[in-house]
Amino acid sequence: MAVDLHLHSRFSDGSDSPTEIVNAAADLGLTGIALTDHDTLDGIPEAAAAAAARGIHFVGGTELSVSWRDLSMHMLVYFLEPGPGPLQDRLGTLRESRHNRNLEITARLADLGIDIAFADVQQEAGRGVVGRPHFAGVLMAKGHVASIAEAFDRYLADGRPAYVPRMRLTAAEAIDLARATSAVAVIAHPHTLQLRSAEFAAGFRELVDVGLGGIEAHYSEYTAEMRARIAEICAELGIVATGGSDYHGTYKPGLAIGVGRGDLRVPDEALQRLAEIR
């Protein structure tokens, strides 16, 4: 059986509701899922209720942007629930930083001659945390670009004229906060760090020493060989090889729940092992 431990709803930068995601996963026969919206836990109650109704195992989580060795890294944190707590409380500060960044992105786009009201971006996001994909959606809707990908390539990606950095925890801080919250931290899509596999094993050992629980080995953008190699690194480090589709609905076309681009399968043992090390 299979699981999907990397899913985004419209509470951050996905297009689907938590209920829609749960129902799609259950229809596919997945045994478990994790909702990992960026910097927020707001979609968890709805997802948990839908999962209980469909008889599918559900884990609450979030995805954080962190810094490590002067690099930008994404980290998934599992077994989180809304309410007070060490990491939950810090998410509020991160969301405030994200809001300030969004206002600056709006100003930079205006400087480029692209007049987009921030209210339009908020409307695109609905109830969710506003992020760059929502800016991309508005840019596309207003005819400035032809696709989400073009919006990032021309304006929003790191190094492009409307990109604005934002506050990040360090990787060690994120792991420490996760452990203090009885949660498990996992490195997401490590290929984005552009390190060689030998550097993965050597560099990530320092994070294992402070409590890292796993690395996302089974990922939509990986070849079978990459998945196998990262799983080997996880075994060498004694941590869990996790995985997921990184589904965002219409904001990441071509990715499907559970199967990514069609060839993804995340074994349910990944979720079992995460629960064990918790």
Image (tube, rainbow, N blue to C red):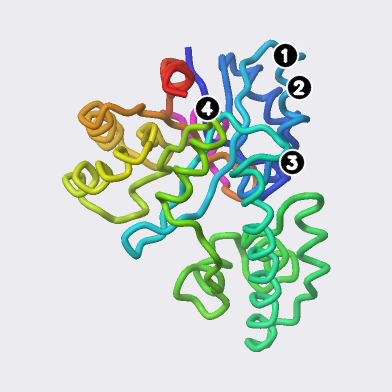
Label 1 sits on a secondary structure element that is: helix
Please identify, in this view, whether the residue under mark 3 or under mark 4 is nearer the observer: 3
Q: Residue at x 71, y 71 (%)?
A: 143
Label ID, residue 54: 1
Q: Residue 114: which quarter of the image?
A: bottom right
Q: Is residue 187 left or right of residue 236?
A: right
Q: CA distance from mark 3 to mark 4?
A: 19 Å
* Type of amino acid under label 2: Ala
Q: Earlier in the sequence, mark 2 or mark 4?
A: 4
Residue that mark 2 sits on = 50
Q: Badge 1: few (under 14), some or many (20 or more) residues near its Cα, within 10 Å?
A: some
Residue that mark 3 sits on = 42
Label 2 sits on a secondary structure element that is: helix
* Type of amino acid under label 3: Asp
Provide residue 168's location: percent of width, then percent of height. Answer: 51, 60
Residue that mark 4 sits on = 4
Q: Earlier in the sequence, mark 1 or mark 4?
A: 4
* Type of amino acid under label 1: Arg
Q: Residue at x 39, y 32 (%)?
A: 213
Question: Considering depth in this image, is 197 or 137 the residue closer to the camera?
Answer: 197
* Type of amino acid under label 4: Asp
Specify the segment rendered in magenta.
253-262
* Disc 1 to disc 4: CB gap under 8 Å: no
Q: CA distance from mark 1 to mark 2?
A: 6 Å
Provide residue 199's location: percent of width, then percent of height. Answer: 20, 49
